[in-house]
Amino acid sequence: MARTEISAGGVVYRKVEDRLEVQLIMDRYGKISLAKGKMEPGETVEETALREIEEETGIVGEIIAPVDIIKYKYINPVHGEVDKEVHYYLVEAKGGLLRPQVEEISGVSWYDPAEAWLKQEQGGYDNNDIIVRKALALLGIHV
């Protein structure tokens, strides 16, 4: 039986005056992605999402709504086949200072929603398309 691994993260946004901005990270492989990470013992998926966002990007957030769950399989060199489940949330930035956790990611930036969608389409992971699209829709932006 395959091992199950649960991760969580989010599509982080902020309001700057009358504009919305969406956070994207550049992962260590040079791909556009979203802050996320593995659940630790005793954590809820929501706690995991907020902790990982803060650790990877420096931003303290508040969960606004669930977005979706991505499921896939991968091969772990030690454990073999792993069933991976990643829970994503729409998260509003409430504080903190934007800074990448260089041990985990290459960079983190804020983007206009249309630019964020273009960056996701052109340089992101295909399975994150639905997550970014759904998160933007929750914000009233349809791409």
Image (cartoon, rainbow, N blue to C red):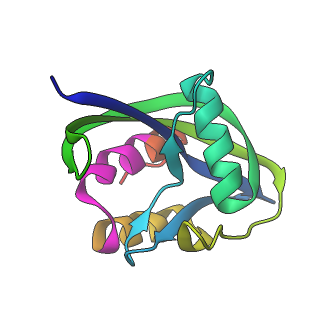
| Secondary structure predominantly adopted by residues drawn in magenta | helix
The residue range painted magenta reads 123-134
Give the answer, above or below, for where 138 lies relative to 130: above
Give the answer, above or below, for where 5 lies relative to 42: below
Front in this rendered view, residue 12 or 56: 56
The quarter of the image holding the C terminus is bottom left
Residue 14: where, in percent of width, then height?
A: 71, 53
Does residue 130 show up magenta in the picture? Answer: yes
Q: Residue at x 37, y 65 (%)?
A: 120
* Left or right, residue 63 beside residue 97: left
Q: Which residue is drawn at 23% across and 53% down?
A: 77
Q: Quadrant of residue 123?
A: bottom left
Give the answer, above or below, for where 71 lies relative to 16: above
Most distant residue in the front direction: 78
Does residue 90 show up magenta in the picture? Answer: no
Tell me, yes or no, if residue 47 can be seen here. yes
Residue 67: where, in percent of width, then height?
A: 45, 33
Q: Quadrant of residue 105?
A: bottom right
Residue 54: where, in percent of width, then height?
A: 71, 51
The quarter of the image holding the N terminus is top left
Q: Which residue is drawn at 64% across and 50% down?
A: 53
Q: Quadrant of residue 29?
A: bottom left
Tell me, yes or no, if residue 87 can be seen here. no
Q: Which residue is drawn at 25% across and 40% down?
A: 79
Q: How many labels does the image show?
A: 0
